[in-house]
Amino acid sequence: MIGPEGLGRSEAAALGELVRELVAGGAALGWVAPPPVAEVAALLAEELTLVVAYSGDLPVGFGYWRRYDRPTHRVNADIEKFAISPRFQGMGVGRAVMTALIDAAVAASIEVLTLDVRGDNVAAAALYESLGFRRYGVLERFVAFGDARYDKLFYALDLRA
């Protein structure tokens, strides 16, 4: 997990390159084209809890959550971005990143952790469900990627128990 000092410049650049690579490969991260590295670095400098997985010095996956802005919702947080390089999928990296995000949420007294996933990302949905997330809704054909339309699935993990 990245500490309160955040990412160093070279770490932010390396993570920005990973995001560009993932988006170019079709990862559902909210961009339709690879974003500039500076845009990713600026995003990751915001107030959030970030977990990065490395292989040597290179990032191979990441995820982050952020508390909801509304005062009445600030006891909860949303996992806004989560992705693992295809070269490292199926090796437990995604589970490790998600587990670290959940552990950080518990330590921060988050009550409910939410996320959404594009409906065609069956592997991610299976991972979330295996970690205790429950699907609570769907927006059909909500995500537009060129001419394609995908469902948006909503998940929540109740950490109050």
Image: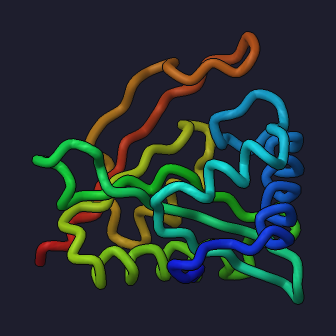
**Residue drawn at point x = 88 percent, y = 68 percent:** 87
Q: Looking at the picture, does residue 107 appear above or below residue 71?
A: below
Identity of the residue furthest to the bottom in this view:
56
Q: Quarter of the image for the C terminus: give it.
A: bottom left
Colour mapping used in the image? rainbow
**Residue drawn at point x = 28 percent, y = 45 percent:** 69
Q: Quarter of the image for the N terminus: give it.
A: bottom right
**Residue drawn at point x = 68 percent, y = 72 percent:** 7
Q: Looking at the picture, does residue 103 appear above or below residue 72?
A: below
Q: Quadrant of residue 134?
A: bottom left
Q: Quadrant of residue 82?
A: bottom right
Residue 111 seen: yes
Residue 134 seen: no
Residue 46 coordinates in the image, percent (x, y) = 53, 55
Q: Looking at the picture, does residue 141 appear above or below residue 66?
A: above
72 or 112, which is in the foreground? Answer: 72
Residue 153 coordinates in the image, percent (x, y) = 43, 39
Q: Quadrant of residue 132?
A: bottom left
34 or 70, which is in the foreground? Answer: 70
Residue 140 coordinates in the image, percent (x, y) = 44, 21
